[in-house]
Amino acid sequence: MKHPITKIILPITLSTLLLTGCQSPSTSGSSPSLSQPSTVIPSATVSPVPDEPASSTPMVENPQDTASEAEPSEDIMQKEIDTSDWMPADPFDIDLAEIEDFLNDSKLLGILSGRNTKVILSESDESRQYLRWAVSLCLTQAASDKGLPLQTNEDGVPYFPISDFEEAAYELFGIQYDFSSLAESASDRAPDGMLCVTWGYENSLAGTTIQENTLLKGNGEYSAILENQFYNPGEDSTVYLEQIVFSQNNSYRFSPIRISQVKSIQ
């Protein structure tokens, strides 16, 4: 599994505020952006913004450990998708290896606890920072898969076209969001028409495995149970089981799946 761009490890809790930008890589310049026409991305082998800088103290907390600290308010509660009457799906009808690679390489499920996913899908005022964070992971992974060097600002913070953020958000969650307002208020500066990615966090997800025998299909969507392995420095890793409900993006640039639910079952 690829090493993530970020090197700073911070706690992922609901009370922690997200940072904007991304941990600085060594590459900068005017490389091609993902806004150029593209075909399907080859599969790999394998919350508001504070002004203070990220702490360098290595700390990690599993999102499942902290997600229960605060439940979504009534106005952002999402109706749970009932898959009890769905039928077993043929694993050969879907490229599970491609999806598993995408989830492992992007580490999306390290931040998409059931609570965070509910917030994103609610499209409430609270959702935009979680949405930006998830899309940032998706965009940087897509660039890595394509072998594109990242464009960075003078501080080394990677940025992508706003149109790429919007396209990736739609592919990933089916959400149409105007990211230009975030670009105007972001503390990390990017050229006109661009937006810096969320930075400063390395989530503690070590690996994701799809339980093939749990694959169900209904209403044009799939459901599967995932084994997500998390780590804490100096401690044994812990496996959490989650159910993900998703549909396939047969033609895509950034995400092979559209997520409609992530639910903890342990």
Image (cartoon, grey):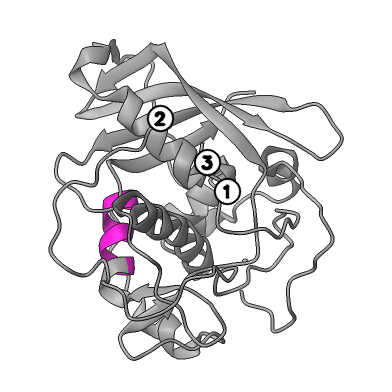
Q: Is residue 44 left or right of residue 22?
A: left
Q: Does the magenta stretch include residue 169?
A: yes
Q: Which of marks 3 and 2 is nearer the N terminus?
A: 2
The relative height of residue 110 versus residue 161 in the rendered view (above or below) is above
Instruction: Pinpoint residue 22: horizontal percent, then vertical percent.
Output: 55, 69
Query: Magenta region, mostly helix, strand or loop?
Result: helix
Instruction: Write down the residue under mark 3.
Output: 109
Q: Please name the residue that numbered disc 1 is placed on.
A: 111
Residue 67 location (% of width, % of height) = 68, 45
- Given the image, on which type of amino acid does mark 2 rest? Glu
Q: Please say if 248 is above or below 181.
A: above
**Residue 193 seen in the current view:** yes
Q: Which residue is drawn at 44% across and 81% down?
A: 182
Label 3, label 2: how far apart the Cα atoms are: 11 Å
Q: What residue type is labelled 3?
A: Leu
Q: Name the residue under label 2.
A: 100
**Separation of disc 1 and disc 2 at Cα?**
16 Å
